[in-house]
Image: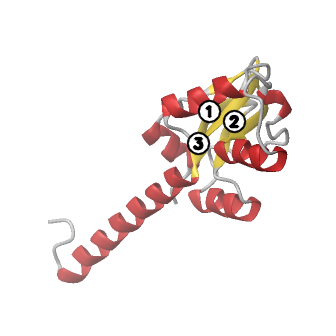
């Protein structure tokens, strides 16, 4: 079973974040600069919220536009669901699918360890399945372990 910890070890635990008073313009700039789909909003070391590209697009649709100097704290999702490093990638995928979100902060013992995306999870699952298939093919053909 591949865990979230395995994924964090592979991809790294770097998390891009802003404070709640940062502007939407700053958030959009950081999303584009880092080529990511979501940013954590941190107050000190605590997760105050999360903001994604989708959140900003939905705001624009709902309001007919948006003020780029508005604080992200007014737009962010405040109730952030997290996952532990010891949980499986299957659990992560189930949570993301059930709750309809694409990013999941990884928290252990109250400390932020990383942020995973559905793309990260899918890539890791495909890699694990490919390894399993190759091992089974080797076993079947007799070349396993040679």
| Mark-to-mark CA distance, 3 and 2 | 23 Å
Q: Earlier in the sequence, mark 3 or mark 2?
A: 3
How would you rate the neighbour count of disc 2 (Cα within 10 Å): few for under 14, some for 14-19, many for 20 or more? few
Tell which of 15 and 125 is nearer to you. Answer: 15
- State the SS at label 3: loop
> Which residue is at 17% across, 79% downward?
142
> Which residue is at 76% across, 40% downward?
65
Numbered disc in front, either 3 or 1: 3
Tell which of 125 and 110 is nearer to you. Answer: 125
Q: Quadrant of residue 92?
A: bottom right
Disc 2 target residue: 108
Disc 3 target residue: 37
The vertical placement of 10 against 100, above or below, is above
Residue 36 position within the rendered picture, expressed as x and y whole percent measured from the top left:
54, 38
Residue 106 position within the rendered picture, expressed as x and y whole percent measured from the top left:
65, 40
Residue 116 position within the rendered picture, expressed as x and y whole percent measured from the top left:
58, 44
Cβ atoms at labels 1 and 2 below 8 Å apart: yes
């Amino acid at each position: 079973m591949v865990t979230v910890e395995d994924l964090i070890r592979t991809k790294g635990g770097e998390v891009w974040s802003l404070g709640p008073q940062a502007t939407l313009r700053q958030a959009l700039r950081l999303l584009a600069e880092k080529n990511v789909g979501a940013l954590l909003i941190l107050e000190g070391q605590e997760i105050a919220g999360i903001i994604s590209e989708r959140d900003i697009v939905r705001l624009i649709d709902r309001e007919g536009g948006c003020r780029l100097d508005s604080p992200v704290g007014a737009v962010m999702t405040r109730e952030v669901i997290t996952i532990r490093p010891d949980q499986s990638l299957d659990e992560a995928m189930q949570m993301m699918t059930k709750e309809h979100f694409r990013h999941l902060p990884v928290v252990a013992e109250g400390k932020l360890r990383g942020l995973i995306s559905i793309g990260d999870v899918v890539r890791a699952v495909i890699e694990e399945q490919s390894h399993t298939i190759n091992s089974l093919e080797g076993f079947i053909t007799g070349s396993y372990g040679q």
